[in-house]
Image: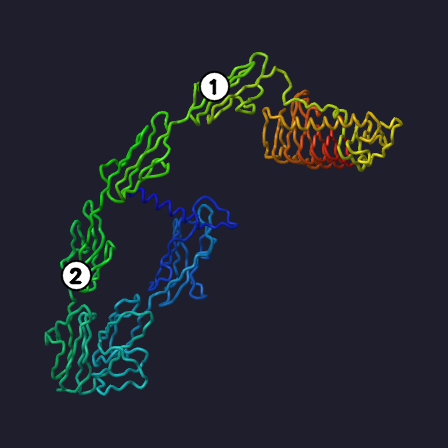
Amino acid sequence: MKMTKLLTTFLIILVVLFAGCRKDDYVEKIGVCFRVIATDPMNVERSVPYAQIVSATFNAKVDPTTMDESSFTLHQGSTLIVGSVSYTDSTAKFTPSAPLLPLTEYTGTIKSTVKNTWGNGMQADYVWTFTTMPQIILAANPIIGGTVSGGGAFAEGATVTVTATPLAGYTFVNWTENGSVVSLSPSMNPNGMNAPNGATEVSASSSYQFVMGSVNRTITANFAVVVLGNYAINLSSSPAAGGTTLGGGSFVENSLKTVTATANTGYTFVNWTDNGVQVSTNSSFSFTLLGNKTLVAHFLINTYTMTASGVNGTVAKSPNQTTFDYGSVVMLTASPALGYSFTSWSGDASGSVNPLNVTMNANKVITANFTLIPTYTLTASGLNGSVVKNPSQATYLSGDVVSLTATPAVGYTFTSWSGDATGSVNPLNVTMNANKVITANFTLIPTYTLTASGVNGTVAKNPNSVSYNTGAVVVLTATPAVGYTFDSWSGDATGSVNPLNVTMNANKVITANFVLAGAPAGPGNLDLGGAALYTVLSKTGISTTGITSITGNIGVSPNSATGITGFGLIMDPSNQFSKSSPSTLVSGNVYAADYAVPTPANISTAVSDMETAFTTGNGKTLSVITELGAGDITGMTLAPGLYKWGTGLLISASGVTLSGAANDTWIFQIGQGMTVADGAHIILAGGAQAKNIYWITASDAVIGSTVHFNGNILSMTLVSVNTGSTVTGRLLGQTAVTLNAATVVLP
């Protein structure tokens, strides 16, 4: 259970760390988001020591090349504090060159330029502030009048005791603040008159105790010269923090004087002594002054008892003593007995913090309350399988985590949990908070058949079984008979990979196709019919600009000869065809639907044959290779075959190579347009011929400038060939064909 909680906590920390990483132009590297996780002092901490070494801890090791005095700085206002920076693993330290000033706010900054050893930087500068301790400065007035002790740096809220001790010939008067000339204490100034400069009297006791505030204080102990002929009464407290005294000063002989001792909180007055001899046990002591007196008021710190106990558990005290001084802190730790849990404190304490720190300021009786932890049963089972509990016990305590593992019987698979659990996670962690009955559900694994065969060859299955479980993988190996070669798969498989891995997810029938050895590779030629007589054939028009050269015939139907522009047509006397002028534009004849018979019927048949070839070529599916190069075949070498894309096709300047024998064929089924970039070459290798290549496009076929193109283009729309390009093949466009200083050669 403890391990599960630790893993859960770790995962939560990872999610928080990753979620905090920057997502803008930041290039994230391996590791968690780099950040500061702790500082010393903490942000807005007060009462920081003057000799503090400032540190920052990161969640990963620091790259030492990014941590120095420029990336870790300390300021007091706008003033940069001089210091040195050091680092160890994931902690950097700034050591000021001089002590920090009292009660001053400082600002620490870790620059975002700091990186971890993975190269990750922080998203922004990390900035925090802290304030140093206030200071008590003590002074004696006059300096030769006496000594003072107890000053220095103190945390806000601390109890401070300062002590003044007069030297010979002087007597203590009082403590003052905010002035150098003091008012007299009541014992020295019975009329209660203040000093001319308005100094504030803060205490008339030589032992002055107070709680440190959030300001620096300068406090002066004032001493007075013993008047000639008078005697001095000097008072002090033992210990100094035990209490205060009043009544000291310089007085005439035989006068009746009263001194008073008042215990501070947590102390009790004991007695007065004179040179170590007890003179009174009353806190208010009167006597006739016959000479100089040095009286000490003695105080004893109060002690208290602590009784801590609990039923169904124990309570440990640290320190474990019979009595405790006032103000001491006792730590109580409650430990429950087996089967119980600690719930709360009662008596002289409350809440549920454990361990508990108790400050002793009275006798205390504290009880730890323990509650019985409820226990629960867990029944886990399944039909056609088994369930294992870990740990396997009759009962479990509330909050225990039990791991359930479902194991199916042969031929079955685990599918889900039901009852007091849901889902399909396996193993399943169950937190016990009630009696639970959980069922593991198992389902029969479906089986499928695989029939694999071929004519003029055999197909082997591995493994060779009557049926297969869902998800099983079967390897089919096609072996051709003598004189034949394996060509492709059909039925419930495609392509020509051999051996072929088949994943069983349904009944399958697969055929291996074998062809005579030496037979041409590829999908076979398309029957162009009458369209084969034309180098360029269009339904709407053929146009040229610049110096174009076409070897073979061109024709337009159903449009008339007006759709043929730029060729300077000269009608033949038969009116059945025309010639270009100059004759180098078209080496053959030019035909149009409005010429004399039999031209209209012949060219109409040629256009119909062109459309039929387009449909036939686009409908082939045997051994098709799909989406090669995601529509970009630049730089590839393609074997004979049937290729298909649902998108357009791009051939960039690096071109493409078609490699095969003289009678091998290629058909390219292009779901959108085809673009051949300027300068591209369609290279034929191994004896491949342009007449056996078919580029079938559902949209425009655009040939760029200075392209060397091979193959027949059958376009449902436009065919465009640009300046300086050469095409060895036919341009068969179902809308228009445009040429710009291009060369087209009938293959």
Of the two numbered discs 2 and 1 on the same chain, state the one appearing first in sequence. Answer: 2
Q: Which quadrant of the view contains residue 48?
A: bottom left
Q: Which quadrant of the view contains residue 440?
A: top left
As helix, strand or loop, the secondary structure at mark 2 comes to strand
Q: Residue at x 57, y 18 (%)?
A: 513
**Nearer-the-camera pick, 692 or 102:** 692
Q: Residues within 10 Å of mark 1 (few under 14, many from 20)?
A: some
Q: Is residue 377 above or below residue 474?
A: below
Mark 2 and mark 1: Cα distance apart in space: 86 Å
As helix, strand or loop, the secondary structure at mark 1 comes to strand
Indicate left or right for 731 with 346 as reference: right
Percent position of residue 500, x then y: 51, 23
Percent position of residue 746, x then y: 76, 26
**Nearer-the-camera pick, 651 or 493:** 493
Indicate left or right for 245 with 579 as reference: left
Percent position of residue 503, x then y: 47, 26
Percent position of residue 257, x then y: 14, 83
**Nearer-the-camera pick, 732 or 223:** 732
Q: Amino acid at mark 2?
A: Lys
Indicate left or right for 171 with 110 as reference: left
Q: Which mark is on residue 364?
A: 2
Q: Furthest residue to the top? A: 482
Indicate left or right for 509 with 583 as reference: left
Residue position for label 1: 461
- Residue 679 seen anywhere in this rendered image of the structure: no
